[in-house]
Image: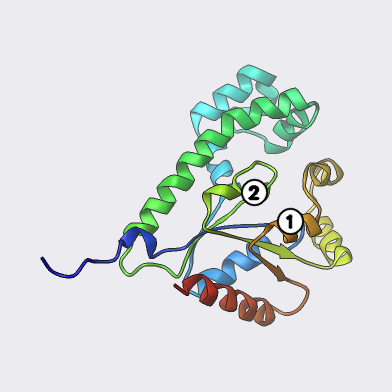
Amino acid sequence: MGPARPDPRGRVPFVGLTGGLGSGKSTACAALRRLGAATLSTDEVVHELYRSTEVRDAVVARWGPEVAPDGVVDRAAVARHAFASAEERAWLEQLLWPLVGARVAAFREEQLAADPPPAAAVVETPLLFEAGLDGIYDATIAIVADEALRAQRAGARGHEAVDERAARQLTQDEKAQRATFAVRNDGSIEDLEQELSSVLAKLGDP
């Protein structure tokens, strides 16, 4: 018998990335891609799911045809219903989260099989800790930024029900304390990329 080969499944760090509204999660994901990581946004997965007939038909059955005019789901209308009560929000989460989880698992398998492997497989998840999803990752990254800067970014994007969504989320400090790495995004993109490069180097250490 020859020497034992290293387990190829252990070669790609599986990382959850999170942050509050306006912290710059998408900017961080773009920087990570430039640094050789593979990334998946759960928000984008949800967008895709809303275009599926399965999810569209379910939300129409629950809330009526006004949430999908012309057969296309109106996410703002869905959000108004979902944030109306804890019961409605729980129903939507029970519909979406298993489907999102399946896509995340498939993404991980794809990256473990990739040749050459990426520097890391990173999943951007806004409610990473709140949904209890952090336990599936090898490490977690919290993107944090100055509060005034976050408010400016979030406002510029026209978030609906910002206060309600923010109330559901842990504070920045809580996210930073629970994450393996807290990365500040107050400066330039170059500064952010340098910090994330350092994180990737630590993830790659045996």
Q: CA distance from mark 2 to mark 1?
A: 9 Å
Q: Is residue 138 left or right of residue 90?
A: left
Image location of residue 12, percent across then percent down? 42, 63
Q: Is residue 160 left or right of residue 36?
A: right
Q: Quadrant of the N terminus?
A: bottom left
Q: Quadrant of the C terminus?
A: bottom left
- Which residue: 48% across, 47% down? 104
- Which residue: 57% across, 22% down? 58
Residue that mark 2 sits on? 128
Q: Is residue 105 left or right of residue 83?
A: left
Is residue 56 placed above or below 12 in the rendered structure?
above
Confirm or deny contact between disc 2 and disc 1 (CB under 8 A): yes
What is the number of callouts on the image?
Answer: 2
Residue type at mark 1 is Lys
Q: Nearer the viewer, residue 112 or 54?
A: 112
Colouring: rainbow
Image location of residue 49, percent across then percent down? 53, 37
- Which residue: 56% across, 28% down? 56
Q: Is residue 118 visible?
A: yes
Q: Is residue 64 visible?
A: no
Residue that mark 1 sits on? 175
In which quadrant of the rendered view does residue 76 lie? top right
Image location of residue 204, percent across then percent down? 47, 73
Q: Residue furthest right?
A: 148
- Which residue: 69% across, 20% down? 63
Characterize the local packing of mark 2: few (<14), some (14-19) or many (20 or more) Cα atoms within 10 angstroms. many
In which quadrant of the rendered view does residue 144 lie? bottom right
Characterize the local packing of mark 1: few (<14), some (14-19) or many (20 or more) Cα atoms within 10 angstroms. many
Q: Is residue 98 left or right of residue 189?
A: left
Residue type at mark 2 is Leu
Image location of residue 79, percent across then percent down? 73, 35
For residue 70, the mark is none
